[in-house]
Image (cartoon, rainbow, N blue to C red):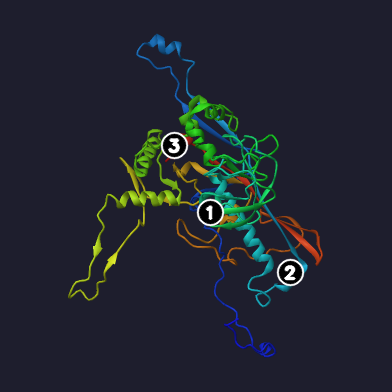
Amino acid sequence: MAQQVTADAFLLGLYKRTYTDKKIRGMFFRNSPVGRRIEKNRIEGQTYQVTMPYDRGGATSGDYTIAVANAASGAKTAEMAVTPGNIFTVFLVTQKEYLAARTKRGGYLKALGYKLFAACDSQRKLFAAMLYGYGCGDLGYLPGAVAAAATTATLNFDTVVKMAIGTQFYVVNGALPTSAYYDAVVRTVSAIDGNVITWTGGGATAGGWIAGSAIHIVGGRDATPLASMPTGLAGWVPYLANRTGANWTTYIGTAFYGVTRSTSTNALAGWFYQRAGGELYMDAIVSGVAMARRGGGVPNIIAINDEDWLVMNGEVNTQTAMMQQINVAGAKNAKNEVARGLAALRFAMSTNWIENVYDDPYCPRGHAWILDNDCVEFVTYSNAEKQLNDGVVDNEPGAAAADENQEEPDTTFKMNIEDYLTMDGNATSVEGPATQVSVSLYGNFVVREPGHCSTVVF
């Protein structure tokens, strides 16, 4: 090796090593800014009950006898009984690992603290994935067909961002989130290179997978099959099949937390807008804002994919003259300068002015949600704030420090530590006793007033 102190192997033992004292940050994908914004509400009990007044009734007429005849058609409400979903992550730490890096003297980070940091970051990623899903562990869709026996696939980044080395997945053969899998073969992600994933555990199904097939994390559904994980915006304000055809009719006609939403779709499942061919993305968003406003909402947050943000950036630049500041004689303090790109997107519809537009890589590409954030929450039994806090503020970029907000917990066996950790000292390893650490997040997303929100498909 050319870059070395000396080629004398016997002399190398003379030299010391200098270790960085800079802050160590995880090189993981960014976490969801929208997930960070949503209110976390601690609850107890069997279900979280939400009542939704969705229709005023039809006992109104210019003819009193008609109004009397329709008196039974009065105000209508629907009560949803929301049950909690689960997100688990588990790791082992051995006594030897723990003792070898018990302090900063033995390692860059404490072994237990770092493993806990990585586990919580995994939960943040799955929390963000579920925010935009149906609750079935849905990670995304295949943008193109995958040939039989293939062990690699090119995905959209909004799917890749939800994966990690070791992620186990199934591929769904059908449009519904509860459609059967192509097969029961568990495939495990072994490498991620840009938007290309490689897996082990078997090639693609004989005959391949068609474009548009959904990818589900293993364990996202039970045997029924029903959702095991938190139900996100694709369930609460759905876009399935662009709200047309038999699959949509089946989906919207199926009870959702005890309520059949096809009775009053826009009120109970939110509004939907599909961009027309040639229509600007920006104009489609404004139409979505108009629909949420039409439904009585006060939309104040928009979630879009970061690649769709770039499309809108291009739309703006094709219609806007670029300002260039040119240094001229005598202006010694000025510099030649050109600004390219958007620092912020804002949307207005009449008196509605939305400044909180989040470029969220977890939002499925080609989709956006316009939300009245006052009616969106995550109800949880767990200490979700501690689990999901990565130290980054609002929509700012950045990565969490690997030793921030993840102090090393007490290693004594306990069922419940700070409402999210369980320590089980009963595990073993070839290097001695081990502790199994379980990090549990119990809860569900709730949109209390779906009719005040809308979704847009580009």
Q: Which residue is mark 1?
A: 195
Looking at this view, is 237 or 321 the one in front? Answer: 321
- The earlier-in-sequence mark between 3 and 2 is 2
2 and 1 marks in contact (CB < 8 Å): no
How far apart marks 3 and 1 lie (CA) works out to: 35 Å
Numbered tag placed on residue 452 in the rendering: 3
Question: Which corner quadrant of the image does residue 192 belong to?
Answer: bottom right
Residue 86 versus residue 24 in the image, above or below? above
- The earlier-in-sequence mark between 2 and 1 is 2
Three-letter code for the amino acid on which mark 1 is drawn: Asn
How far apart marks 3 and 2 lie (CA) works out to: 52 Å
The answer to whether any part of residue 427 appears in the image is yes
Q: Nearer the viewer, mark 3 or mark 1?
A: 1
Q: Secondary structure at mark 2?
A: helix
96 vs 313, left or right, is right
Q: Position of residue 249 (x, y in %)?
A: 53, 26
434 vs 55, left or right, is right
- The earlier-in-sequence mark between 3 and 1 is 1
Q: Which residue is mark 2?
A: 97
3 and 1 marks in contact (CB < 8 Å): no
Crowd class of label 1 (few under 14; some 14 to 19; many from 20; radius 10 Å)? some
Question: Which corner quadrant of the image does residue 368 belong to?
Answer: top left
Q: Nearer the viewer, mark 3 or mark 2?
A: 2
- The quarter of the rendered structure image containing the C terminus is top left
Q: Farthest left residue?
A: 330
Q: Position of residue 444 (x, y in %)?
A: 59, 43
Three-letter code for the amino acid on which mark 3 is drawn: His
